[in-house]
Structures are given as structure tokens and as C-alpha cells.
Image: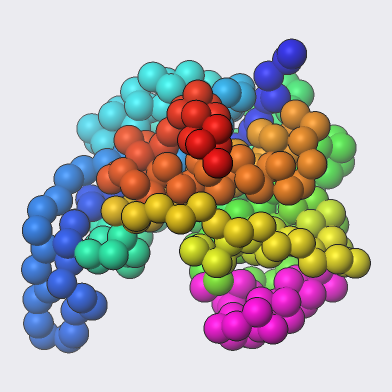
Amino acid sequence: MRKPKILVVGSINMDLCMYGVEGMPVMGASSFCSGYQYAEGGKGSNQAFAVSKLGADAVMVGRVGSTDENGRKLLKSLESAGVHTEYIVRDPEHLTGMAIMSVLSGGSYYSIFANGANGYVAPEDVARALENDTYDMVLMQLEIPLETVYRTYEMAREKGIPVFLDAGPAMHIPLERLKGVDYISPNETEAEALTGIALGDERGAERATVYLYQELKPKWVVLKLGSRGVLLYDGKDFLRVPANQVEAVDTTAAGDTFSAGFVIKMCSGSSVTEAVDYAQAAAALCVTRKGGHTSIPSDSEVRAFLSEF
């Protein structure tokens, strides 16, 4: 069976991960942590790495600095997983993006993001990849310029390529130019930022999914609710898929791994609930490990995990 070919358009960062952070800092004070490490990441980079690790053909569009070591390390990591990097621009004028990830003891995190070269990913970068090859789906997120997000969707639609938007990081954006996107997938924080609706209970989650559906008319709204699972809505019915219960160490890259797994399965002919089952299993394995790229499981690991249930 032919492997799906996924075009990932997005950010590429070096993450500085601080572990065991003692709560949120307050102005003028310090928060302490138990240790730190550098990890290859960025939402787009994580998604491309996960697409390849989970068994599909990943092509990445993004930017890294051509003069800093972080860019070279990230390209090497992506290529080691089999990601095609020929459309990643080596930018001589801007440094590779960086994120400082502060991971609390329960595995949740907050971050500070320096855009760097990610802030210059241009529609022309995406056009080159779309003109030179064919793809089963485009996977993108919001860590690159918003105009590039819009133009990526518009160019993919012109070519009849379905698009999955991982709606992170959390921000309020105009949605008009994304109308008709095939899949939109925010987490709770991102959905609240997009809709202005609090998601503290099931009613709030349903209201947010309906709002997004009415604004965008996608095939599916795929709302990630963490330990509460996933809520799906197609304009007619709600589907709820429970989460796999695991002990979280670090949630970095979990949402990106979910997106990659879901996209692969939808491109392979799975039902939407089968795709969510697989994606949640991949994300569950991811949160039991530290880091960005280093936490992402392989397809064989995910299948072994699913066989236990």
C-alpha cells in the first residue's frame, strides 16, 4: 500500500526545556527547576518528524537560520527521521526559532517563543513545494505568519488538496479566509481563544465546536480535551472518544503527534474515530517521554500500545 504523502508547513525551533519547574513565576522573583535539556522541536518540525516516524512520507516547508548551530541540528534530526527537507529555507538573515519550555511537575508546560526565522516563512516558500509535487494532505499550524497560513490554505484548495489546521498556539484570528478548511483541531485553550467560549464543562466544549463549525464549515471539528479525550463534530452529530490514561511526564509535542497520527489515518482510509484512536495512542506515548522529537513514538510502538487495549 502506498504511503500517504503529507506536506507540513510550519515552525522549526530549538527548545530549551526546563523540568520540574516550581510553579508560575511572579514579577521580580525566580522559579527554580530540577534540570534542563535542549530538544529539537517547533510545532511544524514536531509534526513533520511525527508524520515520518508514524509511517508516512513527510515533506516540510519552513525556515531555519543558516548561520547558527541550532538550524543545523534541527535539519539533521528531521533528516534522520526521513523527512524531506529540500523546501526548508536556510535563512542567512535570521536565527533559528527558539522556545523556552517550562515543564511543571505534572507534565503541563508554559513557554516563551522567539519566532526567529519562523517569522519569515513566506507563501512563495510553500508555492515551490506545491508546484513541484503532489500531496495527500497539507498539515499546518499558527506558529508562522498568518498571511502564509491563509495563502497555504488557498493554494492547497486550488489544487484540491485537503488541509488540516492544528489551531495552535492559542490566539484569536479572523477565520473568514479559512472557510471550508477540511479539519480544524484546537485544544481547550486554543478553542477558547478562537471562540471566546469557556470550555470548563461539556456544554462549553459543545458550544465551542458548534461555533467553529458554523464559522468554517469543515468536514470535522476535532477538539482535543486532554485527559477528557476528543470531541468531534461534523455539523450534525457529536462523537466523543475517551483518552488513554497514562502518567504524563512532559506534554511537549503531544498535540503535534496527535495531528500527525490523525492525518495519516484519514489519508489511509480510516474512519474518523479510528483515526482519533490511533492519534490519541500516539499522543499518550508521547507524554510519557521528555522532549520534542525525542518523545515521538514510531508506528510500531503505537500499534503495540493499541494492542494492549
Highlighted magenta segment, given as a residue range: 189-215
**Colouring scheme, one of rainbow, by chain, secondary structure, one colour:** rainbow
Residue 222 rendering spot, x and y as whole percentages: 69, 59
Horizontal relation, residue 245 to residue 175: left or right: left
* Viewer-closest of 13 and 21: 21
Residue 67 rendering spot, x and y as whole percentages: 27, 33
Q: How many marks?
A: 0
Query: Residue 283: in sight, yes or no?
Result: yes
Horizontal relation, residue 67 to residue 89: left or right: left
Residue at x 38%, y 49% (from the top left corner): 287
* Viewer-closest of 4 and 76: 4
Query: Residue 60: in sight, yes or no?
Result: no
Is 240 drawn above or below residue 140 in the view shown? below
132 falls in the magenta region: no
Q: Main secondary structure of the magenta part?
A: helix
The residue positioned farthest toward the front in the image shown:
309
